[in-house]
Amino acid sequence: MTLTRFQSLTRGAADAPAVHLVTFGCQMNKYDSLLVEGRFARKGYRVTAELSEADVVLFNTCSVRDHAEERVYSWVGELKRAKEENPELVIGVMGCMAQRSGDDIFRRAGHVDLVCGTRQLQHLPEMVEELYELRRESRSRPPRVSALSLDDDVAVERAGEPYTGGRAGFLVAMRGCDLSCTFCVVPRTRGRVLSRPIADLVREARWMVAGGARAITLLGQTLNSYGEDLPVPAAGEPALRGRRGRPSLADLLYALEEVEGLARVRLITLHPAYVTRALAEALRDCSKVERFLPLPAQSGSDDVLRRMKRGYTTDLYRGRVDLLRGIVPDLELGSDWIVGFPGESDADFEATLAFAGEVGFSQGYVFKYDPRPDTAAELFQDDVPVEVKQERNQRLLRRVEEVALGRMEAWLGREVEALVDEPSPRRAGVVVGRTRHGLPVSLAGGAELLGREVRVAVDHATAFGLAGRQVIEAAALTGQ
Ligand code: SF4
């Protein structure tokens, strides 16, 4: 007897249908994959780490580079054989590549059954059910299901689900982006800004802490524009810290500061144009918020910034950094950089090198410009030769590391407070965490230190982080 899918759902956990997710790309994809696993678990599925065991295989994809999309097609290609052997297998593609390519994915990979965009992923279990029903109705040709609308809100209630995000978890505060940088595909793949209400985020943060999270990283494309799309609290509704007006990132930080058991709040990623005094004051006042801001500059040339449509000049950027450091003098900054953008001259590049040194970043990622379909810059002539891009990439990387090393070395001989996140992925007997300034720090130790805040005497620094030994408080030594 062939069981309908619903019948098998109600059978025991052991042979409950199994779902497996393969996640590519950014932290937001990592958050979304856990959210999707939670949706399936609610429907009686079990989440398996073994692709070979799965009844449903989903690829959560990235579109930021051509290479990222090609990797997905090669993974999907590998499953062609498995699908021939088991026609019941469901193969789905979700995330940014699904949003950008849509039904083209079916044309390129005929054994894919399901395509789900970035604002539809909460509906995936129902989409799989719909596919099973369609299969039952038509045995002639394999049905397909896709959902690509960018109008829906993805926010779902997580209470009742097991939290599986670990000691250092991610929390999506807002989705989408209202800007239109000419090199970027995100507005196309993730839609307009959609901020989640502070109350929902505080509730989810409490759920994460109850499940073992000690640090929460708030996620958004332009996190400091948080709340710009939210309504002004109506008359009679409690004002935000005595202030009428739309909620802001600062309000969210003050609210998370009240979450018991939460040790650290981290932020990814911000935009210079949205930096405000209120944000700087929240960084000063909220002891749980790490004093590190990823504030991508992308270039140090105003001509290049104009062609990138970044929405600021180097002077505006400097002014915002001065505002931040005027209120939080020990603030650390990180930046992303693009070299070889169309039209970038030697002088533009020299300006970028100088700007990276002038502002002083303790972290930096450098990328060679790569034209992306569905972006405005796709139409620009990609006129910087590959070897020049390569050479500029190396020179800027060296500069960024030089500057970062200088900022890290400033901590040598000092004691820092580190939240220990996890065992070192590379060295046994070593754990890694972050200082109150968001700097990576490693020290000798084992599971007993995980999730704890410890004092570390810094005795080593590289461009990528600090290392030291734990300072055992006198009190702990005497057992007081
Ligand atoms: S701010 Fe620019 S680079 Fe960042 S997500 Fe928006 S469009 Fe892309």
Image: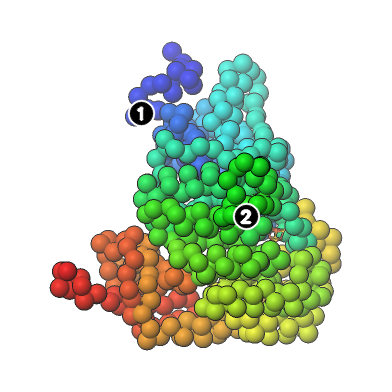
Q: Which mark is residue 381?
A: none
Question: Which residue corresponds to mark 2?
Answer: 243
Specify the quadrant that holds the N terminus.
top left
Q: Work out whether residue 25 can be spotted.
A: no
- Residue at x 15% of width, y 73% of height: 478
- Residue at x 40% of width, y 28% of height: 16
Q: Is residue 215 left or right of residue 345?
A: left
Name the amino acid type tagged 1: Ala
Specify the quadrant that holds the C terminus.
bottom left
Which quadrant of the figure has residue 17? top left
Q: Residues within 10 Å of mark 2 (few under 14, many from 20)?
A: few
Q: Work out whether residue 290 can be spotted.
A: yes
Is disc 2's CB within 8 Å of ligand 1? no
- What's the CA distance linking mark 1 and mark 2? 50 Å
- Residue at x 36% of width, y 50% of height: 212
Question: Which residue corresponds to mark 1?
Answer: 13
Quadrant assignment for ligand 1: bottom right
- Residue at x 65% of width, y 30% of height: 145
